[in-house]
Image: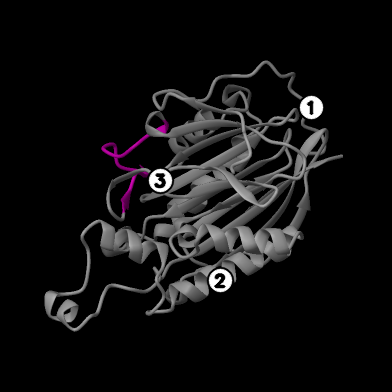
């Protein structure tokens, strides 16, 4: 039985509503920004806040440049976490897909305490996007914790977030796609999506809850039961983020693994040629991709 959780779905055409919380001074703010990094443990701050572990493993062919995912973690207010996934198709136009996602996250980190952002994921996505000058596009997810236990989430595309409580997933974001394997994305081109197309959610969290955020390289290759098993067995957030990333990366390279990605592809009508089907074969395997994982545990000071 699922454990009850307060969940408010905000209409997608607007950023999440502004909450009447006093703004804390910015002294003591600590930001962490990276494209691809080893495990880190970052205690964030007061009342309810986040203790964060991160781990990222680039696509095997993109190790030299560190992959095309980017992320940032901030201690501002209750804590802010975010992931952006550069769209690899830009490489066909001789554009480095990592530049857009990296600049997008750098801008988000710089603007997180901007008064015009109002500690709102929608406004942060908008200002970070409009401040990004690199060519390219990226999916993005941002989660901002109010100190009193309100988690505000905004996402464009197929980066994702799951909330675990007492060993059960009680909330998951839903991927946004135009069609299979073509997610919504922020772009340097005017015809793509903006923050107005984002999906917004507000969820009440409690001390001990665990937030699992990642790029699609995580959720395309790891099932929910695997996420729950790793997070519940390994309470250290740095360790659990590392293990989840390693499992996702391993599955992505296994051509026989019945991955979430392969199951969805078959459900959408993508499969092996008919002659292979006649031999009892089917589409299997993980999705080779960059893998970025953020594990954030809700704590009190």
Q: Give percent across and percent down for residue 206.
A: 73, 37
Q: What is the secondary structure assignment of the residue under circle 2? A: helix
Q: Is residue 48 visible?
A: yes
- Residue 260 location, quadrant: bottom left
Q: CA distance from mark 3 to mark 2?
A: 21 Å
Q: Is residue 187 visible?
A: no
Q: Earlier in the sequence, mark 1 or mark 2?
A: 1
* Number of dots carrying numbers: 3
Image point 41% across, 67% down: which residue? 259
- The residue indicated by pointer 2 is 247
As drawn, 195 above or below 235: above
Q: Bounds of the magenta span?
A: 182-195
Q: Earlier in the sequence, mark 3 or mark 1?
A: 1
Residue 189 colored in magenta in the image:
yes
- The residue indicated by pointer 1 is 25
Mark 3 closeness class: few <14, some 14–19, many ≥20 residues within 10 Å:
some
- Residue 238 location, quadrant: bottom right
Residue 299 colored in magenta in the image:
no
Q: What is the secondary structure assignment of the residue under circle 3? A: loop
Q: What is the secondary structure assignment of the residue under circle 1? A: loop
Circles 3 and 1: CB atoms closer than 8 Å? no
As drawn, 289 above or below 111: below
- Residue 116 location, quadrant: top right
Q: Is residue 40 left or right of residue 215?
A: right
Q: Is residue 35 left or right of residue 300?
A: left
> Which residue, as the protein is rendered here, is positioned at the far bottom?
279
- Give the number of the mark in front: 1 or 2: 2
- Give the number of the mark in front: 3 or 1: 3
Image point 26% across, 75% down: which residue? 282
- The residue indicated by pointer 3 is 175
> Which residue, as the protein is rendered here, is positioned at the far front?
1
Q: Is residue 183 left or right of residue 82?
A: left
């Amino acid at each position: 039985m699922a454990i009850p959780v307060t969940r408010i779905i905000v209409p997608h055409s607007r950023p999440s509503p502004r909450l009447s919380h006093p703004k804390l001074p910015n002294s003591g703010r600590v930001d962490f920004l990276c494209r691809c990094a080893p495990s880190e443990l970052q205690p964030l701050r007061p009342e309810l806040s986040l203790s964060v572990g991160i781990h990222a493993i680039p696509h095997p062919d993109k190790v030299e440049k560190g992959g095309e995912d980017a992320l940032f973690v901030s201690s501002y207010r209750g804590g802010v976490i975010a992931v952006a996934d550069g769209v690899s198709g830009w490489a066909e136009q001789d554009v480095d897909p990592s530049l857009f996602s990296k600049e997008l996250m750098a801008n988000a980190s710089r603007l997180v305490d901007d008064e015009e952002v109002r500690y709102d994921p929608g406004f942060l996505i908008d200002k970070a996007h409009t401040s990004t000058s690199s060519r390219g596009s990226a999916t993005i997810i941002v989660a901002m914790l109010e100190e009193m236990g309100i988690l505000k989430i905004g996402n464009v595309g197929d980066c994702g977030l799951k909330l675990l409580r007492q060993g059960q997933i009680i909330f998951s974001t839903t991927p946004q796609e135009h069609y299979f394997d073509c997610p919504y994305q922020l772009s340097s081109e005017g015809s793509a999506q903006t923050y107005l197309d984002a999906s917004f959610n507000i969820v009440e969290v409690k001390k001990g809850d665990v937030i699992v955020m990642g790029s699609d390289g995580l959720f395309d290759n790891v099932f929910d039961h695997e996420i729950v098993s790793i997070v519940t067995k390994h309470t250290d957030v740095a360790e659990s983020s590392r293990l989840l990333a390693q499992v996702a990366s391993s599955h992505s390279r296994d051509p026989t693994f019945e991955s979430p990605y392969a199951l969805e592809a078959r459900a959408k009508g993508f499969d092996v040629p008919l002659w292979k089907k006649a031999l009892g074969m089917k589409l299997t395997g993980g999705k080779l991709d960059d893998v970025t994982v953020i594990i954030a545990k809700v704590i009190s000071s």
